[in-house]
C-alpha cells in the first residue's frame, strides 16, 4: 500500500540500522522489497492474486485492523519466515526484502491509510468510491516524488537492482514475473519524471515520520527478541 519509492527508501533505512554486513546482497534485498507487487506482471492478474502475495487472503482492507485479522496475518508472516529464513545466503536477502514489504504495508494500513480513511469519511467518501481511490493514489504518487528528491538514493538502488541474479519467490511468484516487474521498476525510476505537486491528504512530513518509524519497527520485529521469528 505504501508507494514504490517509499518501500525502497524504507529498505535503505533498514540497512543503515542493521549491523554492517547483515544484508549481504543489497540488490536481492531490494528485489525482495518490490516482489509482492510484481504480481501485476501476471497475465490475467486479479485483485485476489495481490492479496495472496501480501499474505492477506480473505482479509478485506477495511477490516484489516480487526484483532482477529491482524492475528491471522501475523501467523501467516511467522510461517513464511520460519519456512524461508534458513535459505542459502544467495536467497535469504530476497526473502528478507519480501517480508519487509508486507510489514511496511501493514504499518501503512494501520497508520497513514487509516488517517486518510478518517479524512475521507468526514467528506462522506467511502472506501469503495472512485474518489477514494483517485485521491489516495495521487497522494501516494506525489509523496513518492518528494521521497525520491529528498533521500536521493534511487540511482544507487537501481544500479544494485540491475545486477541481481534471476530469482523467484517459491510458491508465490515466478522468475519471469519477477524479472518483468523488476525491469519495469528500473525503467519507471530511471526514466519517470518527478512531479512537483504536493500531496493533499497526507503530507510529506507525515511520510518522513512513517519511513523512520517503519524502518525501526521492522528491524526490531525481525531481530532477536522481536515479536516475529528472527530473520535479521
Image: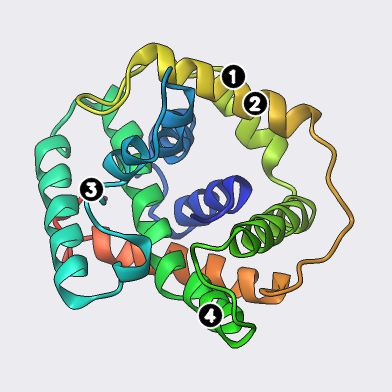
Q: Nearer the viewer, residue 20 or 132?
A: 132
Q: Residue at x 24, y 75 (%)?
A: 66
Q: Residue at x 35, y 51 (%)?
A: 102
Sequence-wise, the earlier of marks 3 and 2 is 3
Sequence-wise, the earlier of marks 1 and 3 is 3
Q: Position of residue 201 (x, y in %)?
A: 69, 75
Image marks 2 and 4: residues in contact by CB distance under 8 Å: no
Within 10 Å of the Cα at label 1, are there few (<14), some (14-19), or many (20+) other Cα atoms? few
Q: Is residue 211 left or right of residue 223?
A: right
* Measured Cα–Cα span from mark 1 to mark 4: 33 Å
Within 10 Å of the Cα at label 4, are there few (<14), some (14-19), or many (20+) other Cα atoms? some
Image marks 1 and 2: residues in contact by CB distance under 8 Å: yes
* Measured Cα–Cα span from mark 3 to mark 2: 29 Å
* Measured Cα–Cα span from mark 1 to mark 2: 5 Å
Residue, disc 2: 186
Residue, disc 1: 183
Sequence-wise, the earlier of marks 2 and 4 is 4
Q: Is residue 66 above or below residue 99?
A: below
Q: Is residue 123 above or below residue 228?
A: below
Residue, disc 4: 115
Q: Nearer the viewer, mark 2 or mark 4?
A: 4
Q: Is residue 191 left or right of residue 89?
A: right
* Measured Cα–Cα span from mark 4 to mark 3: 24 Å
Q: Nearer the viewer, mark 1 or mark 3?
A: 3
Question: From this viewpoint, which residue is outermost toward the right?
Answer: 196
Amino acid at each position: 500500500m505504501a508507494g514504490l519509492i517509499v518501500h525502497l527508501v524504507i529498505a535503505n533505512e533498514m540497512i543503515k540500522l542493521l549491523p554492517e554486513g547483515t544484508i549481504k546482497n543489497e540488490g536481492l534485498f531490494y528485489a525482495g522489497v518490490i516482489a509482492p507487487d510484481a504480481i501485476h506482471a501476471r497475465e490475467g492478474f486479479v485483485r485476489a492474486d495481490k492479496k495472496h502475495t501480501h499474505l492477506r487472503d480473505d482479509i478485506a482492507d477495511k477490516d484489516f485492523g480487526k484483532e482477529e485479522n491482524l492475528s491471522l496475518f501475523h501467523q501467516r508472516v511467522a510461517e513464511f519466515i520460519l519456512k524461508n529464513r534458513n535459505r542459502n545466503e544467495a536467497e535469504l536477502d530476497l526473502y528478507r526484502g519480501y517480508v519487509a514489504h508486507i510489514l511496511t504495508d501493514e504499518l501503512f494500513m494501520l497508520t497513514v491509510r487509516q488517517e486518510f480513511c478518517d479524512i475521507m469519511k468526514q467528506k462522506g467518501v467511502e472506501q469503495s468510491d472512485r474518489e477514494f481511490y483517485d485521491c489516495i493514489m495521487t497522494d501516494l504518487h506525489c509523496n513518492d516524488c518528494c521521497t525520491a528528491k529528498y533521500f536521493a538514493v534511487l540511482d544507487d538502488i537501481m544500479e544494485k537492482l540491475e545486477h541481481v541474479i534471476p530469482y523467484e519467490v517459491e510458491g508465490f511468484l515466478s522468475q519471469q514475473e519477477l524479472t518483468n516487474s523488476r525491469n519495469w521498476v528500473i525503467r519507471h525510476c530511471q526514466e519517470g519524471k518527478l512531479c512537483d505537486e504536493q500531496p493533499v491528504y497526507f503530507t510529506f512530513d507525515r511520510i518522513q515520520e512513517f519511513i523512520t518509524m517503519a524502518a525501526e519497527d521492522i528491524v526490531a520485529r525481525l531481530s532477536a527478541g522481536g515479536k516475529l521469528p528472527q530473520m535479521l
